[in-house]
Image (cartoon, rainbow, N blue to C red):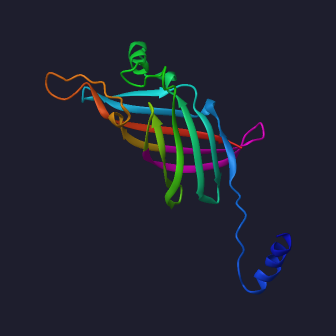
Amino acid sequence: MIRNLLLALVIAPMLGLSLPQVASAKDYKIDPAHTSASFKVKHMMVTWVRGEFEDGVAGTVRFDPDDLSSFHADVSIDVGSIDTRNDKRDTHLRSADFFDAKKNGDMTFVSKEVRNITDGHFQLVGDLTLRGTTREVVLDVEGPVGPVKHPMGSTVYGFTGTTEINRTDYGLNWNMPLEDGGMVVGEEVHIIIDLELKK
C-alpha cells in the first residue's frame, strides 16, 4: 500500500493529474461565556417576547476557513437555563406545557450539509432535536468573522446563525384563545445563535 502511494506521488504530476488534497478542517470549541442562543415569539399577536438560554451552550464546530463546505456543527443547549426576564413565565416554559425540561434537558443541533456558499454567508442544514422530536432545519449563517488572536494565545472565530421554527412541530402546543380572536402565544419562533469559537 505504501509502495502504491509513493508511485502515485511520483507518477501523478508526470501525467498532469491532481492528487486529493488532505483535509485541513480543524475542531473549535464553543466558548460558552461569549456565545448566546436567543429567540423571540409573538405575545397576544401584538408584540415580541424575547428570551435566551443563559448557560449550557456547548459543543464543537469543525471547519476549514478556506473551505466552508467543510463546516460541521454539533451543539447542545440546556433548555432549563431559559430566561425571559419573568420568573413565573420561565417556570411555565420549563414545565410539561412547553420544554418539559425535567425529561428533555437539552435541545441539540447536528449539521449534515452546507449549501449556497457566498462571501461571508452560507446555509447550514441539520437536525434540530427538541422535546424528543427531531426535524430538519436550515440555518442562515453569517461568517466567519476572524480569525482574531486571543490575548491568551488561542485563535477565535465568530458566526451568527438564524432560523425560524413552528413550536408545535416539536410538541410545544400550549396556548390560550383571545377574546378578539387569535392566540396568546404565537407558533412561529425566531432563533438567533451567536457563536464564538476557540481553537
Query: In which quadrant of the rendered image does the C terminus lie?
Result: top right
Q: Nearer the viewer, residue 88 or 109?
A: 109
Q: Residue furthest bottom?
A: 15
At x 62%, y 45%, the residue is 61
The x and y percentages for residue 166 are 34, 38
At x 71%, y 58%, the residue is 24
User: Magenta segment, which residues?
Assistant: 136-161
The x and y percentages for residue 83 are 47, 22
Q: Nearer the viewer, residue 115 or 12?
A: 12
At x 58%, y 34%, the residue is 35
Q: Residue furthest front?
A: 1
Magenta segment includes 139:
yes
The x and y percentages for residue 118 are 51, 61
Residue 97 sits in quarter: top left
Magenta segment includes 65:
no
The x and y percentages for residue 21 are 71, 67
Is 96 placed left or right of 177 in the picture?
right
Is 157 placed left or right of 187 in the picture?
right
Above or below 30: residue 137: below
